[in-house]
Image (cartoon, rainbow, N blue to C red):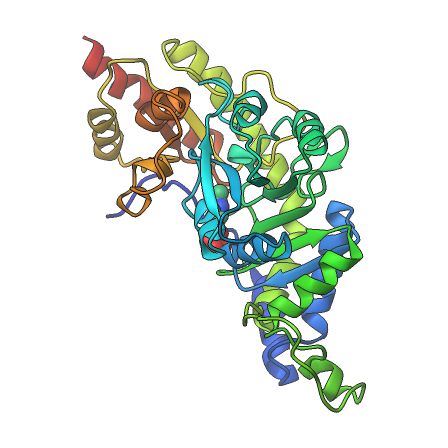
Amino acid sequence: MEWKIPLADIDFGVEEQEAVLSVLNSRWLTMGGVTREFEQAFEEYVGVKHALAVANGTAALHMACLAADLQPGDEVIVPALTFVATANAVRYTGATPVFADIVSLDDLDLSPDQVELLITPRTKAVIVMHYGGNPCDMPAFKRIAEKNHLIIIEDDAHAVGSSFEGRAMGTWGDIGCYSFFSNKNMTTGEGGMVVTNDDAEFERLSRLRSHGMTTLTWDRHRGHAWSYDVVDLGYNYRIDEIRAAIGLAQMRKLPGFNMRRRFLVSLYTEALRKNSPGLIIPFSNPRGISAAHLMPVILPAGVSRHDFMEGMKSRGIQTSIHYPPIHTFSAYRDFIPRLDGILHWTEEAGSREVTLPLYPGMSETDVNLVVESVAESLNLQIS
Ligand SMILES: *Cc1c(COP(=O)(O)O)cnc(C)c1O
């Protein structure tokens, strides 16, 4: 279907094309200097000691769970209102994801109070996810983690460029994981990044990315090593030079992209408040600076989301849901919430949330068209 306004759109230009061509012409396609340059630019941008570019955001999360030494029997507290990869990464290690609630319909981030309630002697880590780029309450999570000796892993898939108290999301926890999938704020098609300030974690993550080997093709090519040992059960979670080159070109544009996204969110917020006062627009009291990855709204109770989304579709506007909560999926039948009702706000958001189009190339006219369509699609139901 041809959308008048799609949910998301990439912003590629001649910069990305030239970057790809230059890698192709260099005849060195993976594990090389461009990847290192991409990592260094990322280290500088987020203000972190080590960044490792990887195949995708899910690989980043899996590596973080392995570096945290998660084992069968360990519990990891995670949000249920997130993409399924957040919890899958825990399960890859044999550990158990335990779902905690979000704060409220106004704050769709994981609730520190609800996390604290679920801590047991088996709890080893917490994974926070900054919904739509809106920073979680990291000082509260840091206090809880210190008191209970927990590791904090950040799922920063929405949060590249988000910060709180001047510190980038991804650097608040022990390990930060980013995704550069094609609908994220910056993209390499498929790609990701894992960051840490801890030298030992970094060494472990580097080996895990490439089969647990102690030296790399690049080192051997440069004459730095002849052979290698394998000291970990590693994976092939590498990115290639082509994607790294696209990533570098996208990074240069990211601050502008994020600024534009924040501007569009402010336009949306003002216009929706005026035209559709029955809607809840989450994150009305933002913590820190958001990368503005998503434009979520919560429909009034009793409104059919299906009919609302059909109304938007008939006006040529693509909408989406972030997210069907993970504990409701068939593959998560064995991971039911610890108590009935414990995911109250997650379930409310899971059934009433709709995500509106948001991407840097949207015009103000586009935003106004979406806002008018929202009002019409709501009024159809209310009248
Ligand atoms: C996109 C996303 C991921 C997974 O990233 P991939 O690069 O697609 O593997 C994980 N968590 C969240 C919240 C995401 O939005």
In this view, 68 is above or below 319: below
Coordinates of residue 253 in the picture (x, y in percent): 64, 50
Residue drawn at point x = 54 percent, y = 27 percent: 115
Viewer-proximal residue, 225 or 99?
Answer: 99
In this view, 203 is above or below 5: below
Coordinates of residue 239 in the picture (x, y in percent): 58, 68
Can residue 360 be seen at all in this image of the molecule?
no
Viewer-proximal residue, 211 or 290?
Answer: 211
**52 displayed left or right of 293:** right
Coordinates of residue 247 in the picture (x, y in percent): 61, 60
Residue drawn at point x = 52 percent, y = 27 percent: 265
Can residue 156 be seen at all in this image of the molecule?
yes
Coordinates of residue 216 in the picture (x, y in percent): 69, 79
**Farthest front residue in view:** 121
The quadrant of the picture occupied by the C terminus is top left
Dividing the picture into quadrants, the one containing residue 261 is: top right
Residue drawn at point x = 72 percent, y = 79 percent: 215
